[in-house]
Image: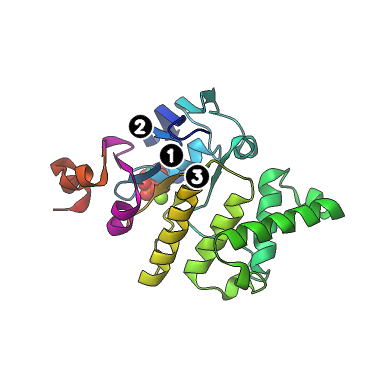
Amino acid sequence: PAHGELLLQVQAVRKEFGGLVAVNDVSFELRAGEIVGLIGPNGAGKSTTFNLVTGVLGLTSGQVRYRGQDIAGLPSRAIARKGISRTFQHVKMIPEMTVLENVALGGYLRGRTGSVRAMLRLDRDEEKRLFAEAERQLARIGMADRMHELAGNLALGPQRLMEIARALCTDPALLLLDEPAAGLRHKEKQALGDVLRQLKSEGMSLLLVEHDMEFVMGLTDRIVVMEFGTNLMEGTPPEVQASPAVRAAYLGT
Ligand code: ADP
Ligand code: MG
């Protein structure tokens, strides 16, 4: 996508779980080349919004468009193929496998059927291609020297980077990250921030949910603030920081 192209449009999206309204009415946009932050208190509906955009959940009502195309209700595999990829709030990995294997396997499960039976039928060429791609993405984010370590032996910071590498294997134009800095040490946050800025400089667009205000303010071009399943406000980091409504709802000051 060309820089500045309208990439993602979330319009009046709503999600109910039984009687509970997890996302009431959320709307926002993201343009190619932007890093947009999605912030808000716990339970505001941020992860659910990610799940709706990436097809992990079906929506109750509303529209999601990617490059002008309606993608609401498409299975997550189809959405991944269109160019949207994501990480989850909790690291998903097989700790007994190497970093490289985790990344390669993730690429396979996302790109294809996801069934174990199909996985066992993986042909040689396909396997080679997946491992080559995994290696390329790990090198891209500076993890080439750790790819043969067991994933379970990594600290949380490198595990999160491993997940980003896995998400990159489907060659996305838009990457959604759910709380990538949560629980990381200062140095790990810096390393993560560097990787995300590098991806942006390579033309990637990013949408990230994050609680760490310093991290969000230093990294994003624009911030969407959610509260009770809806948009509270939207603006540049300084605008959001200065907003009395945001301070009252979220920053607690
Ligand atoms: P956030 O990521 O902003 O903390 P979530 O999107 O995880 O918020 O959750 C929003 C609301 O929806 C919460 O009240 C949560 O308990 C509820 N919720 C999320 N997922 C489910 C689910 N699968 N079933 C029922 N309720 C859910
Ligand atoms: Mg969440």
Mark closer to the observer (1, 3): 3
Q: Earlier in the sequence, mark 3 or mark 2?
A: 2
Element type where label 2 sits in the image: strand
Which region is colored magenta?
212-234
In the image, 39 versus 214, the foreground residue is 214
Looking at the image, residue 185 lies above or below residue 236? below
Q: Report the Cα–Cα distance between label 3 and label 2.
A: 29 Å
Task: Say left or right for 174 vs 41.
Answer: right
Element type where label 3 sits in the image: loop
- The residue under label 2 is 24
Magenta stretch contains residue 219:
yes
Point out the quarter of the image occupied by ligand 1: top left
Q: Earlier in the sequence, mark 1 or mark 3?
A: 1
Residue type, mark 1 in image? Thr
Q: Are marks 1 and 3 in contact (CB under 8 Å)?
A: no
Q: Quadrant of residue 22?
A: top left
- The residue under label 1 is 49
Few, some or many residues within 10 Å of mark 2 (<14, 14–19, 20+): many
Few, some or many residues within 10 Å of mark 3 (<14, 14–19, 20+): many
- The residue under label 3 is 204
Task: Say left or right for 239 vs 74.
Answer: left
Q: Residue 135: where, in percent of width, then height?
A: 67, 61
Residue type, mark 2 in image? Asn
Q: Report the Cα–Cα distance between label 2 and label 1.
A: 10 Å
Q: Any atom of ligand 1 within 8 Å of the CB at mark 1? A: yes
Residue type, mark 3 in image? Met
Point 36% across, 53% down: residue: 210
Q: Report the Cα–Cα distance between label 1 and label 3.
A: 20 Å
Q: Earlier in the sequence, mark 2 or mark 1?
A: 2
Looking at the image, residue 253 lies above or below residue 46? below
Few, some or many residues within 10 Å of mark 1 (<14, 14–19, 20+): many
Q: Residue 41: where, in percent of width, then height?
A: 29, 49
